[in-house]
Amino acid sequence: MTPKYFIIGFVLLSFVSCNKKDGNTTTPPAPQPFTLNNITLDNVSPSGLSYNTSLTPLIKVSFSAPVMQSNAASAVKIEDNSGNALAFTASFRNKDSVIIIQPSAALKNLSKYSFSISTALQSAARGNLNTAVSITFITRIDSTSKFPVISDSALLSLVEQQTLKYFYDFGHPVSGLARERNSSGDIVTTGGSGFGIMAILVGIERNFLSKADALARISKIVNFLSTSAQRYHGAFPHWMNGATGATVPFSPQDDGADLVETSYLLQGLLCARQYFNNPSDPDEMALRDSINNIWHGVDWQWFRQNGQDALYWHWSPDMNWTINMRISGWNEAVIVYALAASAVTGAIPKSVYDNGWAQNGAMKNGNSYYSIQLPLGPPMGGPLFFAHYSFLGINPHNLTDAYADYWTQNTAHAQVNYKYCVANPQGYYGYSNLCWGLTASDDNLSGYSAHSPTNDLGIISPTAAISSLPYTPTESMNALKFFYYTLGDKLWGEYGFVDAFNLSNPWFANSYLAIDQGPEVVMIENYRSGLLWNLFMSCPEIKTGMKALGFQSPQLN
């Protein structure tokens, strides 16, 4: 008996001893948490937002303990960018500690999705998942052609014809002027209408419109401008009501004259005057006379604001010179000084150009970006519309003055913009030698911005590369084909290419803007035939005025 009791006592004593430390009884170890071990998306561990994901992505998630299959379906979600839940299949591996998830149906190309696992996921042994899991990914671009492949020439004609519809089919029914954008109702834009008039001339040359129909439309526009539109010392406002001609304020203080927008309009009107040059056609003669009355009616001296050696952008009958914005280069407005120097009466002297526009040389740049020297303007060139708006009519080929060679300037600007997008220093998804072009346009971040290499928000604007076709023919044509063939299901619409898109945070505008659609038609045609350059530079007043400012060009002789 004694040995038996001894053994029991020994075991009890040993048990107590093993559970004592410094005289205190220790508690059992806490249960291990239920945690995520690893997650892969198409066999790659995601880091931040993932791009170029397959349409049937395989998502593999491993945990620190087996998962309860019964509640996995309610804890796991795949959602599209609108928050709609998508069906998926789930299989379990490694004794239920690994889940493999895949969408039940193929996802859409170039779209954002999210995958998440909530803390409602449970393990029988360890309870709820300690931290929720979430990843976001964007599916790959569909590289197949969305439309039949046609010749480059046919494609350029197609883009011209489709984009022209914005100005002809969608022109305001009362005035014929161009609406600011496709959602503007009665608000029409002065400068965009000038671009539209130039586009209509392209329509005649390319047989998209009859000359009679085009003449009728432009005559309608000019008659409205002559009889109904409000003017301020001969200049038009930025916006007006296309049915009444009343000024629509562009901003609280901008409710009167806009000299830059007026100059874009005059650029188009003078091209039309030169085009409809039949001396024996009474309708063409009447159009020319009406255009001359509008052109001669601008009081350029007034916009020197009391005789200063500069022109001013705005004047308001209520606010007077409150905005007080000098038109100084380098930007989109050299056309203003070209026209002001070419006026039949009240032309500005060269000193206004030198001091006001060129700032006595202060508009020079001279730095190199991506091994390209940029003669003028802000760092990296600024938005590409600087190389477009004034040069829809002014031909930069062989055009020089004391400050620059303008073909060199505009070509360098376009090349810097292109090379910046190819280098893609901010790492935006989709930028490439095929997908480039930064200029002012709509966006999905700020609403609207003057995008450029120094204001790069990941927004590509088709008009930037397309309207640069004369300067960067190969790079621009490659971009145009990418926009049409590869992204055409998202970019190509009723009036040509939509205004802008963002591949890093997939968004495609549903908007069209007159000031972006117009340069595409005009600059494609200038690249093909020089039509608008030849018309504008044939104006005798322009020859005289630009030479007076010191410009030299074979077309000014």
Image (cartoon, grey):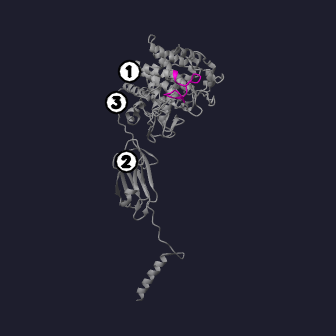
Q: Main secondary structure of the magenta part?
A: loop
User: Quick one: label 3 or label 2, which is nearer the N terminus?
Assistant: 2
**In the depicted structure, whether residue 455 falls above or below residue 301:** below
Disc 3 + disc 1, Cβ < 8 Å: no
Task: Name the residue located 40 percent from the left edge and 89 percent from the top edge.
Answer: 1
Is tag 3's residue or tag 1's residue first in the polypeptide sequence? Answer: 3
Compute the Cα span from label 3 to label 2.
Answer: 30 Å
Q: Foreground residue, 2 or 133?
A: 133
Q: Where are the magenta residues, as a range?
A: 226-247
User: What is the secondary structure assignment of the residue under circle 3?
Assistant: loop
Task: Please tell me the numbered disc located at residue 207.
Answer: 1
Labelled disc at residue 149: 3
Q: Secondary structure at mark 1?
A: loop
CA separation, marks 3 and 1? 22 Å
Mark pair 2, 1: CA separation: 49 Å
Q: Position of residue 268 (x, y in %)?
A: 49, 21
- Residue occupying the far bottom of the picture: 1
